[in-house]
Image (tube, rainbow, N blue to C red):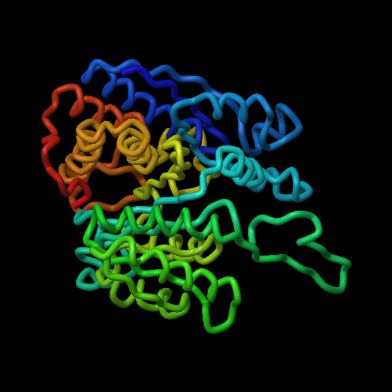
């Protein structure tokens, strides 16, 4: 199978972790007789430096022509003083909008070897396995100039959604729930916000199309508390953009490390942008110690969701699990009696497992 992948390394450790993911994808390509071609473009702070904008037109064009996009990280203190429209994060928001990446999927599942690093008790976090489905291109983070204003004395940001925007993300969440445990939690603030009342009405309308899915509504503050007291109660969570941003970052602590969390952002055509949850970590950039596992796991999500290569995705995920089980870890992780290795070393270990096919690709529960 031939697939064209655009790489957006971005800033900080982005270049290093993207190289690791590329190495793994090339190993998969050789092992399964696929043909992956790669093209690299700028986004974020490096794009501001090179092109005067965080999202050059050439990057947008290339991404629109790709079968999938793999991104490293954007931002850093170097660009903190820039005007809002030149902030590196604008590049990320812009490419999501340009590709109509309306659904952000954040799987959160704990690795047994890392449970001790979670701020929660192991008895609380053990067995956690949830998916947050976040609406990604609407809501408070987006709006026309007329919907945003500041005169030095007051400011306005408008939270706006159309029915179609809510329907498509709710549909994606129901579809995801049918592939998992069949339980959907819709998170809103319907006791206060008109947009949330509208959201809840649409969820109620759609549930008749998915009778096999159990649906509950939960206010966002209650959901935030339950995530850290009983995360095992959740299967699929669906919510709007800002709530999803906050809750998914909160859920990320369950695993004990941001360095282990992948994410996928997908449009209706199945083209996706895949990226680790962590930031650009400029303080360790270029030192060869960055953790590439979240980016490698994001590449696995890419194979599964955009290319329908489930065996290949499982092979990557199981190889990552095997490396951790054997005690190998990067500096940001702590495994008792483990062996600390660098970015290239842990990548090479995963590549060797893939090449030897010693990881068992038939294991269904790849993250546990």
Q: Name the residue: 76% across, 32% down.
A: 52
Identified at 35% across, 77% down, the residue is 226
How many callouts does the rendering have? 0
Q: Which quarter of the rendered picture does the N terminus lie within?
A: top left
Residue 70: x %, y % from top left: 46, 33
Q: Position of residue 128 (x, y in %)?
A: 25, 63
* In this picture, residue 4 sits left or right of residue 195: left
209 vs 142, nearest the viewer: 209
Residue visible at 79% across and 48% down in the picture: 83
Whether residue 244 sits left or right of residue 207 in the image: it is right
Q: Position of residue 360 (x, y in %)?
A: 11, 36
Expressed as whole percent of the image width and height from the top left, the position of residue 262 reads: 38, 46
Tell me: residue 332, above or below residue 298: below
Rendered position, 250 above or below 338: below
Which of the 4 image quarters holds residue 97?
A: top right
Along the line of sight, the residue nearer the viewer: 161 or 366: 161
> Which residue corresponds to the image point at 11% horizontal and 30% vertical from the top-left?
358
269 left or right, relative to 138: left
Toward the bottom, the furthest residue is 191
Image position of 34 (left or right of 84): left
């Amino acid at each position: 199978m031939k697939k064209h992948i655009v790489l957006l390394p971005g800033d900080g450790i982005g270049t290093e972790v993207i190289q690791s993911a590329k190495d793994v994808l090339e190993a998969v390509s050789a092992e399964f007789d696929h043909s992956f071609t790669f093209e690299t473009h700028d986004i974020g702070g490096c794009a501001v430096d090179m092109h005067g904008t965080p999202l050059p037109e050439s990057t947008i064009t290339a991404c629109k022509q790709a079968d999938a996009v793999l991104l490293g990280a954007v931002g850093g203190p170097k660009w903190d003083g820039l005007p809002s429209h030149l902030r590196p994060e604008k590049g990320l928001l812009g490419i999501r909008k340009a590709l109509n990446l309306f659904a952000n999927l954040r799987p959160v599942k704990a690795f047994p070897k890392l449970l001790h690093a979670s701020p929660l008790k192991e008895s609380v976090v053990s067995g956690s396995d949830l998916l947050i489905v976040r609406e990604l291109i609407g809501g408070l983070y987006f709006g026309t100039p007329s919907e945003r204003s500041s005169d030095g004395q007051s400011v306005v940001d408008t939270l706006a959604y159309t029915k179609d925007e809510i329907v498509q993300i709710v549909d994606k969440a129901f579809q995801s729930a049918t592939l998992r445990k069949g339980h959907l939690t819709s998170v809103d603030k319907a006791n206060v916000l008109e947009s949330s009342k509208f959201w809840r009405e649409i969820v109620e309308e759609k549930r008749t199309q998915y009778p096999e899915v159990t649906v509950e509504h939960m206010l966002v503050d209650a959901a935030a508390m339950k995530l850290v007291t009983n995360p095992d109660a959740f299967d699929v969570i669906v919510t709007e953009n800002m709530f999803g941003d906050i809750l998914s970052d909160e859920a990320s602590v369950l695993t004990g490390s941001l360095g282990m969390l992948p994410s996928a952002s997908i449009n209706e055509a199945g083209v996706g942008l895949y990226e680790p949850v962590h930031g650009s970590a400029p303080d360790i950039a270029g030192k060869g110690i960055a953790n590439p596992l979240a980016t490698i796991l994001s590449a696995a999500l890419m194979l599964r969701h955009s290319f329908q290569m489930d065996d290949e995705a499982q092979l990557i995920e199981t190889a990552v699990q095997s490396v951790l089980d054997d005690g190998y870890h990067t500096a940001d992780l702590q495994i008792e009696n483990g062996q600390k290795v660098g970015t290239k070393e842990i990548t090479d270990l995963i590549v060797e497992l893939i090449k030897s096919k010693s990881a068992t690709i038939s294991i269904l529960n790849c993250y546990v």
